[in-house]
Amino acid sequence: MSMSTKQWVVDDISNAALFDLTTGDPMAYFERLNKMTINIDAKQQRVYGGTSKYSFHLTEQDAESGIQLENAVLDFNQLIAATGADISTGSKAVPKTEKFAVLTGATATLSKGSSLIATSDKLVVASKDHASAGMQLSRVASAPTAQQYSITAQGVITFGDTTLIGKTIRAFYDYTATNATSAAVKTTTKNKAYKFVAYGKAIDDETNTPFDVVIIVHKSQMLGTFSLDQQRKTATANSLELAVLDANRADDNVIEIIAV
Amino acid sequence: MTVSKKNDGKEEVTASSETQQLIEEKIKLATELGIWGSFNPVEGYQDTQQYKRINEIDQRLSEIING
């Protein structure tokens, strides 16, 4: 039996994809990975006996192999593949908040006023140097007093307090987006198992030859937490952990690493 | 105020005139309480009859305008 001469360095990270186990259809593609770690577990339990301080045998334990992915972008396909979330496209109520200055005439217009959802608006005086600082103003149909405002269907606000002119207001409201895409994780949401494939480019340092290195996990399913990370001054990094499962294949293969 | 005669001869105050009347009353009350145009309220203004009446007017204006 000869030894494999395949040795390589992967300078960059692989792209990866998830495929439906039944149809083979691609379900998610990861092309902005920060980090990918595939752990091949082979836990053993030491067995001791007699007078020796050293174990004389290792008893094999169940394998808990897994794949950890850290992705620099979030796309819906990835979220759906990982969590089983329902995706829908169409009209959607979208919450919005904004801060604006009150204009001459004690008026202001919400930036999404044209698609404002009626009675969703809540206004708070944001300027700290105003007598009503921090106060929530009440919406009325007409003739607002100093702590009231009226608003048209188009999101044009008239304030009752003229001393608010030039001061800032914080608004919270909902508007209707006609063509939004949303993914909903529900109480009944259940994630599925997928075939995982990582597509890597490797190079042999001695021969300076580039070649493909592909890792196949025949069955994997999300394990643990799918994190949606936001941190200031830091790019998005979403992490996902997949457990390696037994695919019940005739050849018993679970993980394959193919170097071309 | 707009007043019209109905077929049965009774006088009817139209919605627009009622709105105008309510707004005028509200402005008068709010001015008395120091909450019209700017916020300089009289002490305990929220416990006054005028303030309760302003809330009633707001309710009625909402019914008239928003239906």
Image (cartoon, rainbow, N blue to C red):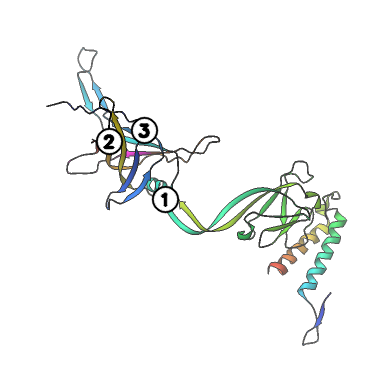
Which span is picked out in magenta? A241-252
The answer to which quarter of the image holds residue A213 is: top left
Q: Is residue A117 visible?
A: no
Q: Residue under label 1, please give it.
A: A85
Residue A110 horizontal/vertical position (percent): 66, 54
Q: Is residue B15 above or below residue A70?
A: below
Q: Nearer the viewer, mark 3 or mark 1?
A: 3
Q: Is residue A74 above or below residue B37?
A: above
Q: Residue under label 3, please give it.
A: A12
Image quadrant holding the N terminus of chain A, namely top left
Q: CA distance from mark 2 to mark 3?
A: 12 Å
Q: CA distance from mark 2 to mark 1?
A: 31 Å
Residue A10 horizontal/vertical position (percent): 32, 31
Residue at screen point 52% across, 35% down: A234
Amino acid type of the residue tagged 3 in the rendering: Asp
Q: Nearer the viewer, mark 2 or mark 1?
A: 2
Mark positioned earlier in the residue sequence (2 or 3): 3
Q: CA distance from mark 3 to mark 1?
A: 31 Å
Return the chain for callout 1: A
Q: Is residue A110 visible?
A: yes
Return the chain for callout 3: A
Amino acid type of the residue tagged 1 in the rendering: Ala
Residue reaching furthest front?
A: A208
Q: A93 or B24: nearer the eye? A: A93
Mark number, residue A213: 2
Residue reaching furthest left?
A: A1
Mark positioned earlier in the residue sequence (2 or 1): 1
Q: Secondary structure at mark 3?
A: loop
Q: Secondary structure at mark 1?
A: loop
Residues at marks 3 and 1, common chain?
yes
Mark positioned earlier in the residue sequence (3 or 1): 3
Question: Could you classify mark 2 by the number of other residues whose Cα lies within 10 Å: few (under 14), some (14-19), or many (20 or more)?
Answer: some
